[in-house]
Structures are given as structure tokens and as C-alpha cells.
């Protein structure tokens, strides 16, 4: 039995996003993910989810995100050894914990903006330190995606890469009651502060069953190397009792719609890995389909995340924290919404231990 008593239980009403796992449909703040990714910047999508969660959208204009990145830069010298963590998610978790927040309004909105601005600055600074390079200051006049890429690479990214990264940040901004979002909402539901909720959510996202998969997907593509080696490599993994990263989903029973959005977004970048990824996905879907005819296991968002983030020039160690750079807006929206409409979330457990 899996998660007795919790599987599929509705723990909140939300206006932020909806996942239809049977039909492979994702709606974010009233828009299909495909349309949002094609039409919106990260800032626009963040504004939409925050407004849906109950934040006043006028607090979140484009300039506010730039100003929040600039404010976060002031924080970098005061982060102690946060950026020395070997793992980018540990660095982000520790750095976010330095933010100050007062629970309630307007403290929540201010803390949300501070955290959304801090994430790209901190993650890029961590990545540069890992590479033995100095951190790059944000440019508040740039878009969020362009500035994040610039702070990471130490030079401006080309327009196609910025567009692809922006499409990625929009695509993963929210996904209903994912494990990390649930974590954030549980913490918010106790009337704790927004920063605590975000720190907890980063911890939940870190795991390879949630946001930690795209690095291993790239490792898999490297290990396979050529399409004709896919089948034997995948069979070897399964024989060793391991799961195929980037395949399967708790909710989707068809291909994750975000996989198609990201596959399309990465196309203009002419990544040499794209053809290999498609071949590996085909082989994995067939093998898993043969093994588990009753449990559809198709590509999830992480499969083409790996190809896209690699193609724009981010190191694979930075993939999970890049997910957080986007999702932090969704988490913040859920905290605002939980505050407005929710009550203490207190699920039950079933006692199966010894009786006195
Ligand atoms: N590779 C191989 N087998 C898989 C699999 C995968 N990626 N995903 C699920 N399965 C198998 C399970 O082993 C299980 O088999 P069993 O019944 O013989 O034990 C069966 O399919 C059902 O899986 P279940 O554990 O119920 O799925 P879940 O809903 O708990 O898991 C994921 C969902 C995402 C955790 C899971 O598909 C997975 O681990 N995927 C790989 C990691 C990944 O890509 N994570 C990113 C998610 S966006």
C-alpha cells in the first residue's frame, strides 16, 4: 500500500495551477502551460501565480524583480559559508535561511519578492565559486532569465539561450500539490513565516524523486552516448534494480506536457544531445511499457530539462537549484494562498504498531 490515507487526498483549494494526469494537461493561473511558456517571461508568470495566490500583482512589476536581485547581492557577503556547500540545493537552503520575514501581510509579500530575487543571485554565485570564479553582480535592468544566465556564465547569454531558459522558468513555475509545495503549505498552515516555508520546500525538492533528476538524466545520456546503445544500457539499469531517471510520474498517466514544451523550447539551440535524448526516451518508453503494461511510464519534465539547461550552458550540478529559482515563485504563491484560505494541515497516520 502506498501512503495509506494520503494518496489523492485534497488538502487545499487552489487557483494557482491544476494538473490533469489522465489527459496530460497543465493549467497555470488560468493559462495552458504551452501558451504561457510561449507568451510569457518568468516575471509575467511569477506575477500571474502570485496574483492567483492572493498577492497584489502591482507589488510584482518587472522592475521589482530586478530590485530584489540587486538587494540580494548585498546579502552575498553576509552568507557565511553557505556558498561553500558542495551541493547547490544545500547552498540555496542555507542562503535563504538568512532572509528575514515577518509572518502575515505585507511581510509575506516582501519576503516572497526578496526570496525570488535572492535565488538566482545565490545559485549563480554558488556555481561561480565552485568553478573558482568570482561572483557576478546582478543587473536589475535585465530580465530575470537573462540576468541569471549572465551571472552564471560571467558574460551575457545569446538571445536564443535566454529565451529557452525563460521558457523553462515559466514551464516549471508551479505544479499543483507537488511534494515541495505541500511542504511549503504545511509550514505556512502553522502560521509560520514564508522563509521557513521556502527553506522546507527546497529540502523537499532536492531529492532525486522530485527535483533532483535532471542531473542524473544528463549522466544517463552521457553514459549511453549513442542511440544504438540505449536499449542495452537501459536494460542493464533495470536489471540492477535502478529506475530510469526522467521517466514516470506520480500524477501523469501520459507524457508530461512540460516535456513537449521543453523539447520545443530547446530546438532552436541545436543541441547535439537532443536527437540522443529523443532516441533514449523512445527506447525507455518501450522497455518500461513492455515491463509494466498496466502502469504507463512516460517522460517527465526532467527529461528535457536536462537537455535544455545543458544547452544554455548551465553545469549539471546547477540543474536542481535552477528548478528552485523558478518554483520559488510558485511556492510563495501557495504560501500567500494558504494564509488567505487555508487552515492548519494535519493529516492522519494509521497506527500499525504493537498495542499495550
Ligand atoms: N524507471 C523504472 N521503473 C519505474 C520508474 C522508472 N523511472 N518509475 C516507476 N517505476 C516502476 C516502479 O518501480 C514500480 O514498480 P513495482 O510496482 O514493480 O514496484 C511501478 O513503476 C510503479 O511506480 P511507483 O513507485 O508507484 O511510482 P511513483 O508514483 O511512486 O513514482 C516517480 C513516481 C516520479 C517517483 C517515479 O516514476 C520515479 O522514480 N521516476 C524516476 C525519477 C524521476 O524522474 N523523478 C522526477 C519526477 S518529475
Image (cartoon, grey):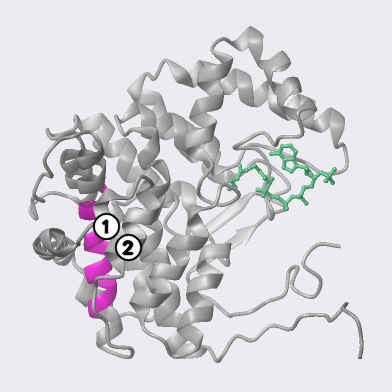
Q: Quadrant of the C terminus?
A: bottom right
Magenta segment: does it hold 118? Answer: yes
Helix, strand or loop: magenta stretch: helix
Image: 348 above or below 222: below
Instruction: Check contact, mark 1 vs mark 2: CB within 8 A.
Output: yes
Tag shown at residue 82? 1
Say left or right for 203 vs 290: left
Quadrant for residue 57, please give it: bottom left
Does residue 29 show up? no
Task: Look at the numbered disc 1 and give the secondary structure of its residue.
Answer: helix
**Cα–Cα gap, marks 1 and 2:** 5 Å
Q: In the rendered view of the protein, which quadrant contains the N terminus?
A: bottom right
Question: Cβ of disc 1 within 8 Å of ligand 1?
Answer: no
Above or below for 340 versus 159: below
Residue 349 picture location, percent across and down: 77, 80
Residue of label 2: 94
Ligand 1's quadrant is top right
Mark 2 secondary-structure assignment: helix
**Along the line of sight, which residue is nearer the eye, 356 or 164?**
356
Where 280 falls versus 12 (above or below)? above
**Camera-side residue: 133 or 153?**
133
Between residue 337 and residue 284, name the one nearer to us. Answer: 284
Q: Position of residue 211 (x, y in %)?
A: 51, 50
Residue at the (69%, 37%) spot, across then down: 298
Q: Toward which corner of the image does residue 91 lie, by quadrant?
A: bottom left
Residues drawn in magenta: 110-123
Q: Residue 184 in the image: x percent, y percent?
A: 48, 73
Amino acid at each position: 500500500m502506498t501512503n495509506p490515507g494520503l494518496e489523492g487526498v485534497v488538502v487545499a483549494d487552489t487557483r494557482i495551477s491544476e494538473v490533469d494526469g489522465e489527459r496530460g494537461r497543465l493549467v497555470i493561473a488560468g493559462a495552458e502551460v504551452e501558451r504561457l511558456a510561449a507568451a510569457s517571461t518568468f516575471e509575467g508568470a511569477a506575477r500571474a501565480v502570485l496574483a492567483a495566490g492572493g498577492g497584489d500583482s502591482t507589488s510584482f512589476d518587472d522592475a521589482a524583480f530586478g530590485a530584489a536581485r540587486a538587494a540580494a547581492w548585498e546579502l552575498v557577503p553576509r552568507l557565511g559559508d553557505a556558498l561553500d556547500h558542495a551541493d547547490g540545493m544545500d547552498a540555496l537552503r542555507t542562503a535563504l535561511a538568512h532572509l528575514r520575514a515577518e509572518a502575515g501581510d505585507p511581510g509575506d509579500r516582501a519576503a516572497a519578492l526578496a526570496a525570488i530575487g535572492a535565488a538566482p543571485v545565490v545559485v549563480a554565485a554558488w556555481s561561480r565559486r565552485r568553478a573558482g570564479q568570482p561572483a557576478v553582480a546582478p543587473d536589475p535592468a535585465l530580465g530575470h532569465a537573462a540576468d541569471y544566465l549572465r551571472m552564471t556564465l560571467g558574460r551575457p547569454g545569446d538571445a536564443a539561450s535566454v529565451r529557452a531558459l525563460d521558457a523553462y522558468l515559466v514551464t516549471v513555475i508551479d505544479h499543483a500539490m507537488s511534494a515541495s509545495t505541500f511542504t511549503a503549505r504545511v509550514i505556512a498552515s502553522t502560521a509560520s513565516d514564508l522563509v521557513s516555508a521556502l527553506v522546507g520546500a527546497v529540502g523537499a525538492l532536492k531529492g532525486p524523486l522530485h527535483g533532483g533528476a535532471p542531473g542524473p538524466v544528463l549522466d544517463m545520456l552521457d553514459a549511453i552516448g549513442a542511440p544504438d546503445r540505449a536499449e542495452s544500457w537501459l536494460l542493464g539499469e533495470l536489471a540492477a534494480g535502478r529506475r530510469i531517471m526522467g521517466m514516470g510520474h506520480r500524477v501523469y498517466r501520459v507524457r508530461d506536457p512540460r516535456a513537449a514544451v521543453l523539447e520545443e523550447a530547446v530546438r532552436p539551440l541545436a543541441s547535439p544531445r537532443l536527437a540522443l535524448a529523443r532516441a533514449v526516451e523512445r527506447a525507455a518508453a518501450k522497455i518500461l511499457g513492455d515491463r509494466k503494461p498496466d502502469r504507463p511510464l512516460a517522460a517527465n519534465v526532467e527529461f528535457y530539462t536536462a537537455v535544455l539547461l545543458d544547452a544554455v550552458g548551465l553545469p549539471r550540478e546547477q540543474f536542481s537549484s535552477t528548478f528552485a529559482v523558478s518554483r520559488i515563485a510558485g511556492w510563495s504563491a501557495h504560501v500567500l494562498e494558504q494564509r488567505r484560505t487555508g487552515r492548519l494541515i494535519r493529516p492522519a497516520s494509521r497506527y500499525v504498531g504493537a498495542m499495550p
